[in-house]
Amino acid sequence: MTVDAPPSRRRRWLVAVVVLWAIVLAVIAYASVRRGDATVRDQSSAADARPVVDRAVGELAAAAGAAGVLHISGYDLERDCRITPVRSGVTLTREVTIYAREADGPGLLDQIVKALPAGYDAVARHTAKAHALRADAGDFVAIRGSITSPGVVSLSVDTGCRPAGDIELTEPAADRSVINPVLGAFGATAKAVTAAEAPCPNGGTVRTVRADATPGTPPTSLSEPLRPLTTGATVIVNAPDRVAYRTPQAAVSVDADGGDLAIATTTGC
């Protein structure tokens, strides 16, 4: 005849098993974080993920190649997102914008998908209503892209909501020499000049310099003052409110912004 263990003994064994299992899970989680192999997004901070974001921006710039006029953004840190209902975090985002010829947008998404590293698992989807790109840069950093208007491909790289960590976001000093010729073409005075950069996958750096400027005289067109700079250049967009072109030295765009100008130049990759 089998005698069952007393209830108190069974409870002690059950408590011991639960405690042991909790210790095992804690050790696994601790070891995972120590190795940098996060198993869920909130095990990795925005500070940890920033190099992944920067690398992905450089990969996108290289993948786009010379198909259009490409600019990268600096860092956008959204605070007070919710990791859980009782825990707040931050989301770090960077943007890549490409001005292409109107018919070239869908093909450009396909080109980027083919050129990104295989580990990104990039895919482009095309329907009658939308064109979209999705990829995974690793460490739960997502890449999303779409055609936001004819010929404009917008790509974002973001960490999703996670702990901030010891994050420091410093932008490089702006080299005004690359943007001064455009300012001079309009007799414009720059109100603000900023720069952003990311590492290229094969070495070097992709760098975008932006200026918000007031022209000396409001231009009747954007293309006429730029004619000396676009002679021999590849003009991608020539519209009343935007001119975008490539030279061997840089990719340049000028947008009419009310009475002001938004100017951007990109070098590298």
Image: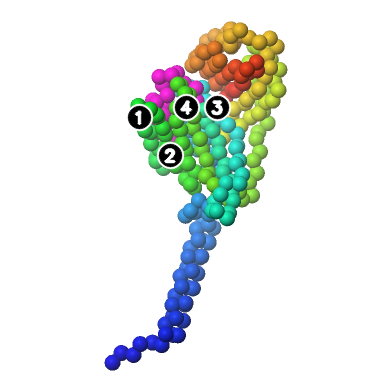
Alpha-carbon span between mark 2 and mark 1: 18 Å
Alpha-carbon span between mark 3 and mark 2: 19 Å
Q: Secondary structure at mark 1?
A: loop
Amino acid on which disc 1 is placed: Thr
Query: Going from the N terminus, do you reach mark 1 or mark 3 first?
Result: 3
Tell me the crowding category of disc 1: few under 14, some 14 to 19, or many 20 or more residues within 10 angstroms, Cα based.
few
Q: Main secondary structure of the magenta part?
A: helix
| Residue carrying label 1 | 127
Amino acid on which disc 4 is placed: Thr
| Residue carrying label 2 | 135
Observer-side mark, 4 or 2, equals 4
Q: Secondary structure at mark 3?
A: strand
Alpha-carbon span between mark 1 and mark 3: 26 Å
Range of magenta residues:
98-117
Q: Residue at x 49, y 43 (%)?
A: 141
Observer-side mark, 3 or 4, equals 4
Q: Are marks 2 and 1 in contact (CB under 8 Å)?
A: no
Which circle marks residue 188 in the picture?
none
Q: Residue at x 65, y 35 (%)?
A: 171
Of all residues, the one furthest to the front in this rendering is 85
